Image (spheres, helix red, strand yellow):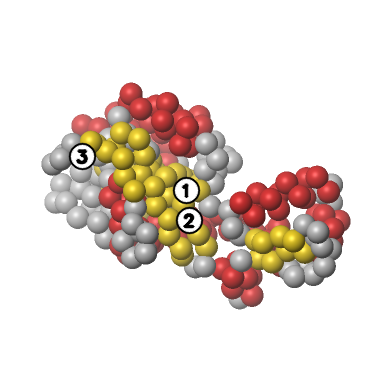
Amino acid sequence: MKILVTGEYHAGKSTFVRTACSKSERPAVNIDRGIDDKTTVAMDFGVVELKGLRLSLFGTPGLARFDIIRRIVSRGADAVVFLIDAADELMDYRVKYLYEEIAGYLSPTRVPYIFAANKQDLPNARPPEKLKNFFKFIGDEPLYPISALDYEDVERVLLKVIVKLVDKVWPVLQTLYKYHGEVKGVEFVAKELGKGAYETRAYLRWLERRRLIDVDWRQLVYWLCPGLLKMLQK
């Protein structure tokens, strides 16, 4: 699954992706410039596995002039982790504009958003309650206090992403579970969901690209990934 990690300049996006990958065999990749004060100029990328699911993290640059890169990197994302710098009030005015930009690419009504107030390890960090009063676009969604330097904080946010994504398609997953491993299971799913063959295949290919299922299209049989199976068996 593709997860967009975004936020304003110096909100901690690169640190978030690096920390998420710190226990992985594959370290995060960052395209930046500078020595002491590095600035992302293209994107961050990392792959992690949690709960048996594979998450591909794409971090965006935060500077205003990189809006074209943000638009390209946003394409096809399944969820958004939106970081807010809790320690820098001077950037608050830019946060609202950036949220509106990202929401224009990835509608909050279609794609789950997870909001996190980063840099809680700093003495001047503002609490989530204060930030929520200012950033009205968060609405009723939680604003999680984190330090992107802390692996447990980062993992907690990514687990929230997984919960939102799974909840979104839970009824469909339950139907898929019924015919997991059955020959012509694709046809059975299409019939039960009341979908046409083309629409069902398109959806299963979407899941296949995200490594959530494997499909044998000749026998029309599919297998859910171990992570999904474990969730559905509980």
Furthest toward the bottom, the residue is 234
Residue neighbourhood size for the residue with mark 1, other residues' Cα within 10 Å, grouped as few (<14), some (14–19), many (≥20): many
Please give left or right for residue 123 compared with residue 84 in the image.
left
Q: Give the residue displayed 23% in from the left and 50% down from the top.
A: 119
Residue neighbourhood size for the residue with mark 3, other residues' Cα within 10 Å, grouped as few (<14), some (14–19), many (≥20): few
Can you identify the residue that label 1 sits on? 3
Q: Position of residue 113 (x, y in %)?
A: 47, 45
Q: Secondary structure at mark 1?
A: strand
Q: Could you tell me how far apart the alpha carbons at marks 3 and 1 are, in whole angstroms? A: 22 Å
Q: Position of residue 207 (x, y in %)?
A: 64, 54
The disc, 3 or 2, on the residue closer to the chain's N-terminal end is 3
Can you identify the residue that label 2 sits on? 55
Q: Position of residue 114 (x, y in %)?
A: 44, 49
The reply to whether dot 1 and dot 2 touch (C-beta < 8 Å) is yes
Q: Amino acid at mark 2?
A: Leu
The reply to whether dot 3 and dot 1 touch (C-beta < 8 Å) is no
Q: Position of residue 133 (x, y in %)?
A: 34, 40
